[in-house]
C-alpha cells in the first residue's frame, strides 16, 4: 500500500518562513544586545535589560519552534499560532485605544494577525492539513 502525505498549504509555508526569519533575527539581535550589555557597567540598567533580553530570546526560540511545528503540520502549532496571533490582535488594540500609538503602526499590527487568523480558520484546507 502506498501512503500519501498531507500537503502543506502555501500560506502555512509563508507564515512558517516569516516566523523562522523573525525568530532567527530576534535571537541574533538579542544575543548581540546581551553581549553589549555585559560590556556596560550600569548594574541597575543591566539587571532589568538582561531580564527583557532573556524574555526576547525565549520568544525568538518559540518562534523558531512554531516554524518547525507549522512546517511539519503539527496540530499544536496551529493552535499555538492562533493564540499568538490573537494576543497580537489584543496587543494592537490596546496600543491603539489605550496607549494611543500611531494609527498606522497599530492598524498594520492589527491587520497582519487578523489576516493570519482568518486564513487559519476560514480555509478548510488549512484546518484539514493540521488534522492527524
Image (tube, grey):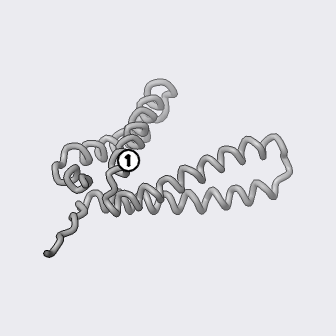
Most distant residue in the front direction: 1
Which type of secondary structure does the marked residue at label 1 adopt? helix
30 to 110, vertically: above or below: below
The quarter of the rendered structure image containing the C terminus is bottom left
State the residue at coordinates (39%, 36%).
Answer: 89
Residue ID at (15%, 75%): 2
Q: Position of residue 32 (x, y in %)?
A: 67, 61
88 on left or right of 47:
left
Q: Nearer the viewer, residue 1 or 71?
A: 1
| 71 and 122: which is toward the camera | 71
Instruction: Examine the rendered structure and indicate whether residue 127 appears above or below residue 68.
Output: above
**Residue visible at 81% across and 40% down in the picture:** 44
Where is residue 70, by image quadrant? bottom left
On the image, numbered disc 1 is attached to which residue? 81
Relative to residue 99, is residue 126 drawn left or right?
Answer: left
Which quadrant does the N terminus fall into? bottom left
Relative side of 3 to 21, left or right: left
User: How many numbered circles are shown?
Assistant: 1
The residue that appears at 25% across and 63% down in the rendered structure is 8
Q: Is residue 85 positioned above or below 8 on the image?
A: above
Q: Could you tell me residue 127's position as x and y percent?
A: 22, 49
Q: Residue furthest top?
A: 98
Estimate the x, y position of residue 115 in percent, counting from the top left: 29, 45
Image x and y of residue 114, in percent: 31, 41
Query: Which image quadrant for residue 130?
Result: bottom left
Q: Nearer the viewer, residue 57 or 130?
A: 130
Mark 1 neighbour density, 10 Å: few (under 14) some (14–19) many (20 or more): many
Residue sticking out furthest to the left: 1
Amino acid at each position: 500500500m502506498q501512503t500519501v502525505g498531507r500537503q502543506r498549504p502555501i500560506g502555512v509555508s509563508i507564515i512558517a518562513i516569516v516566523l523562522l526569519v523573525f525568530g532567527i533575527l530576534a535571537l541574533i539581535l538579542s544575543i548581540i544586545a546581551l553581549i553589549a550589555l555585559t560590556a556596560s557597567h550600569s548594574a541597575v540598567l543591566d539587571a532589568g535589560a538582561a531580564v527583557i533580553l532573556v524574555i526576547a530570546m525565549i520568544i525568538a526560540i518559540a518562534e523558531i519552534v512554531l516554524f518547525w511545528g507549522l512546517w511539519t503540520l503539527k496540530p499544536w502549532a496551529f493552535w499555538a499560532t492562533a493564540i499568538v496571533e490573537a494576543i497580537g490582535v489584543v496587543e494592537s488594540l490596546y496600543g491603539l485605544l489605550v496607549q494611543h500609538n500611531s494609527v498606522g503602526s497599530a492598524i498594520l499590527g492589527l491587520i497582519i494577525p487578523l489576516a493570519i487568523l482568518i486564513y487559519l480558520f476560514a480555509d478548510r484546507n488549512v484546518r484539514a492539513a493540521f488534522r492527524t
